[in-house]
Image (spheres, helix red, strand yellow):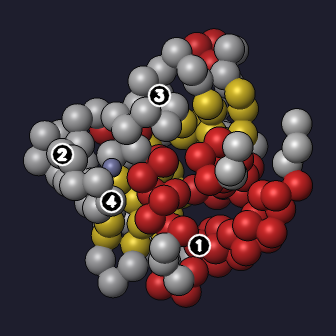
Amino acid sequence: MNTYPAHWLITLLLPIFSIAMGCQSASDKLPEVVVDRSECAKCRMLISDARFVGLLQTDEYLMFDDLGCMLNYQLKTAPQEIRGTWVRDYYSDTWIAIKDAVFYRRDDIVTPMGYGYIGASRLNPEPAATTKAVRLENAAALQEDFTQRFLTAK
Ligand SMILES: [Zn+2]
Protein backbone atom coordinates (compact mmCIF):
# COMPACT_ATOMS: atom_id res chain seq x y z
CA MET A 1 0.00 0.00 0.00
CA ASN A 2 1.43 3.31 -1.04
CA THR A 3 0.60 5.83 1.67
CA TYR A 4 3.22 8.43 0.85
CA PRO A 5 1.00 10.98 -0.96
CA ALA A 6 -1.16 11.44 2.15
CA HIS A 7 1.73 12.35 4.43
CA TRP A 8 1.84 16.05 3.68
CA LEU A 9 -1.89 16.30 4.29
CA ILE A 10 -1.69 14.43 7.59
CA THR A 11 1.10 16.74 8.66
CA LEU A 12 -1.22 19.66 8.01
CA LEU A 13 -4.17 18.09 9.78
CA LEU A 14 -2.58 16.85 12.99
CA PRO A 15 -2.37 20.33 14.55
CA ILE A 16 -6.13 20.70 14.04
CA PHE A 17 -6.72 17.83 16.40
CA SER A 18 -4.02 18.86 18.83
CA ILE A 19 -5.68 22.23 19.26
CA ALA A 20 -9.20 20.85 19.35
CA MET A 21 -8.25 18.28 21.97
CA GLY A 22 -6.77 20.92 24.25
CA CYS A 23 -10.01 22.86 24.60
CA GLN A 24 -12.59 20.53 26.05
CA SER A 25 -13.51 22.47 29.18
CA ALA A 26 -17.02 23.68 28.31
CA SER A 27 -18.53 20.23 28.01
CA ASP A 28 -21.22 20.62 30.67
CA LYS A 29 -23.86 22.30 28.51
CA LEU A 30 -23.78 20.48 25.22
CA PRO A 31 -26.78 20.58 22.91
CA GLU A 32 -29.09 17.61 22.72
CA VAL A 33 -29.41 15.63 19.53
CA VAL A 34 -33.02 15.81 18.41
CA VAL A 35 -33.58 12.99 15.93
CA ASP A 36 -35.39 14.11 12.77
CA ARG A 37 -35.07 17.75 13.92
CA SER A 38 -31.34 18.50 14.32
CA GLU A 39 -29.59 19.25 11.03
CA CYS A 40 -26.12 18.27 9.86
CA ALA A 41 -23.98 21.40 9.48
CA LYS A 42 -22.21 19.87 6.47
CA CYS A 43 -24.73 18.03 4.31
CA ARG A 44 -27.92 19.61 5.77
CA MET A 45 -29.63 16.27 6.23
CA LEU A 46 -31.74 15.79 9.34
CA ILE A 47 -30.08 13.58 11.91
CA SER A 48 -31.71 10.16 11.79
CA ASP A 49 -29.56 8.25 14.29
CA ALA A 50 -27.93 10.00 17.25
CA ARG A 51 -25.26 7.33 17.75
CA PHE A 52 -23.17 8.52 14.81
CA VAL A 53 -23.24 12.24 15.58
CA GLY A 54 -20.23 14.52 15.97
CA LEU A 55 -20.16 18.00 17.48
CA LEU A 56 -17.84 20.94 16.96
CA GLN A 57 -17.83 24.15 18.96
CA THR A 58 -16.93 27.29 17.05
CA ASP A 59 -18.89 30.50 17.69
CA GLU A 60 -21.80 28.10 17.93
CA TYR A 61 -22.30 24.35 18.24
CA LEU A 62 -22.25 22.52 14.92
CA MET A 63 -23.74 19.04 14.77
CA PHE A 64 -22.95 16.44 12.12
CA ASP A 65 -24.98 13.36 11.24
CA ASP A 66 -21.89 11.31 10.37
CA LEU A 67 -18.30 11.57 11.63
CA GLY A 68 -17.23 11.79 7.98
CA CYS A 69 -19.24 14.99 7.60
CA MET A 70 -17.47 16.41 10.66
CA LEU A 71 -14.05 15.49 9.30
CA ASN A 72 -14.89 17.08 5.96
CA TYR A 73 -16.03 20.25 7.72
CA GLN A 74 -12.86 20.41 9.81
CA LEU A 75 -10.73 20.30 6.68
CA LYS A 76 -12.26 23.59 5.57
CA THR A 77 -12.12 25.29 8.96
CA ALA A 78 -9.17 27.08 10.52
CA PRO A 79 -7.99 25.09 13.57
CA GLN A 80 -8.15 28.12 15.86
CA GLU A 81 -11.88 28.46 15.14
CA ILE A 82 -12.60 25.05 16.67
CA ARG A 83 -12.91 25.28 20.46
CA GLY A 84 -14.10 21.80 21.21
CA THR A 85 -14.93 18.47 19.60
CA TRP A 86 -17.23 15.75 20.88
CA VAL A 87 -18.64 12.54 19.47
CA ARG A 88 -21.47 10.28 20.57
CA ASP A 89 -20.51 7.12 22.36
CA TYR A 90 -22.11 4.56 20.06
CA TYR A 91 -22.98 2.25 22.96
CA SER A 92 -24.41 4.70 25.50
CA ASP A 93 -25.53 7.44 23.08
CA THR A 94 -23.99 10.16 25.25
CA TRP A 95 -21.47 12.88 24.42
CA ILE A 96 -17.80 12.16 25.01
CA ALA A 97 -14.88 14.51 24.44
CA ILE A 98 -12.92 13.43 21.41
CA LYS A 99 -9.80 12.85 23.55
CA ASP A 100 -11.76 10.18 25.46
CA ALA A 101 -12.91 8.40 22.30
CA VAL A 102 -11.64 5.55 20.22
CA PHE A 103 -13.04 4.98 16.76
CA TYR A 104 -13.98 1.91 14.80
CA ARG A 105 -14.45 1.47 11.10
CA ARG A 106 -16.93 -1.24 10.29
CA ASP A 107 -17.91 -2.22 6.82
CA ASP A 108 -21.08 -3.89 8.12
CA ILE A 109 -22.43 -0.71 9.71
CA VAL A 110 -24.14 1.76 7.45
CA THR A 111 -23.71 5.23 8.90
CA PRO A 112 -26.00 8.04 7.71
CA MET A 113 -23.63 9.29 5.01
CA GLY A 114 -21.83 6.01 4.47
CA TYR A 115 -18.44 6.80 6.00
CA GLY A 116 -18.68 3.83 8.35
CA TYR A 117 -17.09 5.29 11.48
CA ILE A 118 -18.35 4.94 15.02
CA GLY A 119 -16.99 6.58 18.14
CA ALA A 120 -16.91 4.94 21.57
CA SER A 121 -15.57 5.76 25.00
CA ARG A 122 -12.04 4.50 25.60
CA LEU A 123 -12.93 4.14 29.29
CA ASN A 124 -15.13 1.13 28.56
CA PRO A 125 -13.87 -2.30 27.58
CA GLU A 126 -13.99 -2.95 23.88
CA PRO A 127 -17.52 -4.10 23.05
CA ALA A 128 -17.85 -7.54 21.54
CA ALA A 129 -19.70 -6.03 18.61
CA THR A 130 -16.54 -4.37 17.40
CA THR A 131 -14.37 -7.46 17.05
CA LYS A 132 -14.60 -7.28 13.26
CA ALA A 133 -13.88 -3.56 13.22
CA VAL A 134 -10.72 -1.67 12.42
CA ARG A 135 -9.82 0.11 15.65
CA LEU A 136 -8.55 3.68 15.28
CA GLU A 137 -6.89 4.65 18.53
CA ASN A 138 -7.54 8.39 18.56
CA ALA A 139 -8.70 11.38 16.53
CA ALA A 140 -5.42 11.58 14.61
CA ALA A 141 -5.75 7.94 13.54
CA LEU A 142 -9.35 8.57 12.52
CA GLN A 143 -8.27 11.57 10.45
CA GLU A 144 -5.50 9.57 8.81
CA ASP A 145 -7.85 6.73 7.92
CA PHE A 146 -10.40 9.20 6.56
CA THR A 147 -7.74 10.96 4.50
CA GLN A 148 -6.49 7.73 3.00
CA ARG A 149 -9.94 6.41 2.17
CA PHE A 150 -11.59 9.53 0.84
CA LEU A 151 -9.02 12.19 0.01
CA THR A 152 -6.05 10.37 -1.43
CA ALA A 153 -6.16 10.05 -5.19
CA LYS A 154 -6.25 6.41 -6.17
ZN1 LIG B 1 -23.89 15.24 7.14
Residue behind mark 3: 91
Looking at the image, can residue 45 be seen? yes
- In the rendered view, tell whether residue 5 sits above or below residue 145: below
Residue 20 — which label?
1
Spatial CA span between label 4 and label 2: 11 Å
Q: Which dot, 3 or 1, sits closer to the camera?
A: 1
Residue 62 — which label?
none
Residue behind mark 4: 42
Q: Earlier in the sequence, mark 4 or mark 1?
A: 1
**Residue type, mark 4 in image:** Lys
Q: Which dot, 1 or 2, sits closer to the camera?
A: 2
Q: Residue furthest left?
A: 37
Looking at the image, can residue 101 be seen? no
Residue at image x 40%, y 72%? 57
**Residue type, mark 2 in image:** Leu
Q: Label 4: state its secondary structure.
A: loop
- Residue toward you, 1 or 74: 1
Q: Earlier in the sequence, mark 3 or mark 2?
A: 2
Q: Which dot, 4 or 2, sits closer to the camera?
A: 4
